[in-house]
Amino acid sequence: MAKVLKGDDKDLGGFSVSRVLPHFDKKMVGPFIFFDNIGPAKFPAGKGINVRPHPHIGLATVTYLFAGSMLHRDSLGSVQEIFPGDVNWMIAGNGIVHSERETHEVRATEHPLHGLQLWVALPPDHERIDPDFLHVGKNDLPCIYRPGLMMRLIVGAAYGRSSPVRTFSPMFYLDVLADKDSELEHPARDQEAAICIISGALEISGQRYEKGDFVLLDSDDTSFTALENCRYVIIGGKRFERIPHIHWNFVAYERATIDEARKRWDAGEFPSIPGDDEEHIPLP
């Protein structure tokens, strides 16, 4: 039977973030080890997102927006503004540094922000691969159309389609627009899955779920019916046999690897971001 996981809501001054994963009752859903629902927020001119350079290891970050934009920079030299429907996929591997800010044009006027940021744990045989960054525009992501349903496949494979994003274990991440009374079957009942309802309401196994609910699915939850026009995302994938440790921005299967990363960041041994190397978030 499906189960709602409550997020840890944080007020970050002008906007809120609901962090659902990792959760006390469920550390991971497939390879997804971190789930942040950002906003929705509306910033006045002069305010907005301004995340200083910080490091990652052992994971891939997935950024996907419903409204607004963010400017990504990283230590590989990547500079990429992301808009709704696009995907930023950053593989940290053995170590990367990035920042998330806004352009002058965005910051100068009132602007919205709403989106999701997820982390995907890399499997043990890939946790120390070289870092990489990929941006895929919305028009290059597969769309799946069915009566009353329009789906965009963000990452992984589902319903006979595959995303161009490079992945390392079986997974899926879909953005679904559903008309009232439309029904969608579970994308992979042999894999773990969860639904986050962005708007509207869904019925799953006879139970009603509404906007903001993060619903952990059971293998018996075979389909989802829209009780009204709604939007939701489905994430999931093959269950990980080993759950890695997560500490600050680091994911690793051995605590010694995290300790080493902490020492590297504290000593200034991570690579810097070209054009954004005068600030950083200190080690907590």
Image: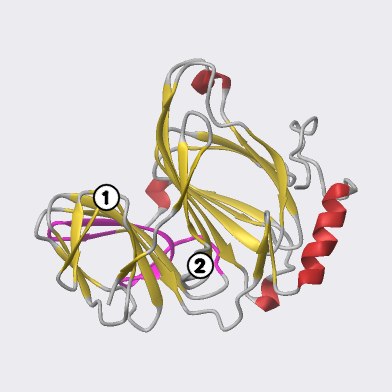
Identify the mark at residue 25; answer none if there is no mark.
none
Q: Position of residue 37 (x, y in %)?
A: 44, 48
Up/down of 4 relative to 12, above or below: below
Query: What type is the residue that disc 1 sits on?
Result: Lys
Say what secondary structure mark 2 lies in.
loop
- Tag count: 2
Query: What type is the residue that disc 2 sits on?
Result: Phe
Query: Which residue is found at the position 77% from the left and 64% from the top?
Result: 258
Query: Which residue is found at the position 48% from the left and 61% from the top?
Result: 164
Query: Which residue is found at the position 82% from the left and 47% from the top?
Result: 271
Relative depth, front residue between 91 and 29: 29
Magenta-drawn stretch, dominant element (helix, strand or loop): strand
Position of the N terminus, as image quadrant, is bottom left
Query: Which residue is found at the position 26% from the left and 82% from the top?
Result: 220
Q: Position of residue 196 (x, y in %)?
A: 34, 57
Relative depth, front residue between 150 and 24: 24
On the rendered structure, is 214 left or right of 11? left
Residue 42 picture quarter: top left
On the rendered structure, is 89 left or right of 159? right
Residue, far left: 181
Q: Which residues are magenta?
A: 144-167
Q: CA distance from mark 2 to mark 1?
A: 22 Å
Identify the mark at residue 24; answer none if there is no mark.
2
Q: In this figure, which residue is indicated by the disc labeled 1?
A: 211
User: Which of the two discs, 2 and 1, labels the residue nearer the N terminus?
Assistant: 2
Up/down of 172 relative to 92, above or below: below
Q: Position of residue 49 (x, y in %)?
A: 55, 31
